[in-house]
Amino acid sequence: MIMGLLVECPECKKRVSLKKKTCSCGFQVGKAAGKNYWIEYYHLGRRKRERIGRSKAAAENRLREVETAKAEGKHIDKDPATVLSLGELVRWYGELPEVVVKKSYRRDMEMTRHLLRILGEETKVAAITTGMIEGYQKRRLGEPSIKKGKDGGPKLTAAATVNKEIVTLKTIFNRAIRHGKLAVNPAQPVRKLPENNVRMRILTAEEAERLFTCCADHLRPVVTTAFYTGMRLSEIVNLTWSKIDLAKGFIRLEGSETKTGVGRSIPLHPRVLKLLRGLPRGLHTDRVFLKRGKPFSEFKHSYSSAKKKAEIEDFTFHDLRHCAINNMRLAGNDYFRIMAASGHKTTAVFKRYNLVTEKELSEMKWLSEESQEDFAKAGGDDRRS
């Protein structure tokens, strides 16, 4: 016989039936928030109780597991979520072979640092609720970011950053469910925070030339390539000569070399083509961009120095990608062609890179009164727009 779900009274810690609204101590358990759930059942003539945590859904799911096991005459194993801590789960996830080889592995594991700090490394997974995760979102939004604001002061953590952390948590829970370590994902109902981090920073032609001039010799080809092709930082610093077709003017990347996992061909701007033809080749490496004859990937300080000399503020390296894509649009290229070159898979993300300036808006074309009259006589709106 299975007795069902119990709830732990936050006041006296006594466990009472979920059907009861009031504990024997007088506390209103039915209205209490953050209470712990238990399941109670008989097995081999003995009464068993398991503390599940703050998730009612997890308790109900565990109860169904026990009922099924009893009906089929199977051994009733203890719910792993009641003994598994968040820290143990994260370490288990980080050691999975399919996770270790991910390009985003280091970034994903860095995301877990904040999750463990706030939710608690020793917190049992079964005790983690949707409410706790929503509380995590609010707390992170109020914490300072490692980045500084325009005034040089502390900058709060962006909603986009918190969303990435929650996505990482959801991924870990889903992988645990797939491996039988969890029954439910408490992060699944958590909604994504609204993001408003579209940057409106595009260099003018004069600013771009200043930046090129102020770059160190090893950095200038990297910055120039980013400005004209829109390639991502990782794609540029890892670029090899075997991927460049100087005769036809293309860079061809394989899926394993792109963020989206899809290969693409990138047409070369005449200025980049000329630049590449003039670059010296390395003796012991096929990499294109070198510093003192050796590949490099870290240039944060030299890039910051170049911006300072060029008197350009609030402009990240990734903004060079925005410049390239925006300039391709202004040159009259259609969205499909630009997306193929930039590697965007969805128009939603792609459109964030296209920034319509006030100068463009000032050149808005208006319908003449004569044309309005003609359209009205023809039967209304111009369906060609």
Image (cartoon, rainbow, N blue to C red):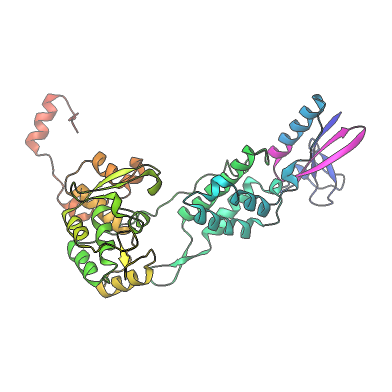
312 sits to left or right of 140: left
Quadrant (top left, top right, bottom left, bottom right) of the C terminus = top left
**Towards the viewer: 291 or 208:** 291
- Residue 241: image quadrant is bottom left
| Residue drawn at the location 30% of the way across and 74% of the way down | 308
213 sits to left or right of 31: left
The image position of residue 114, as x and y in percent, is 58, 59
Asked if the stretch drawn in magenta spans residue 43, the answer is yes
The image position of residue 187, as x and y in percent, is 59, 44
| Camera sees residue 356 | no
- Residue 21: image quadrant is top right
Residue 61 position (above or below residue 338): above
The residue segment tinted magenta is 36-59
**Towards the viewer: 264 or 201:** 264
| Residue drawn at the location 46% of the way across and 51% of the way down | 103
Residue 265 position (above or below residue 290): above
| Residue drawn at the location 20% of the way across and 57% of the way down | 272
Q: Residue furthest front?
A: 283
The image position of residue 95, as x and y in percent, is 60, 51
Residue 58 position (above or below residue 201): above
Most common SS among magenta residues: strand
Q: Residue furthest right?
A: 45
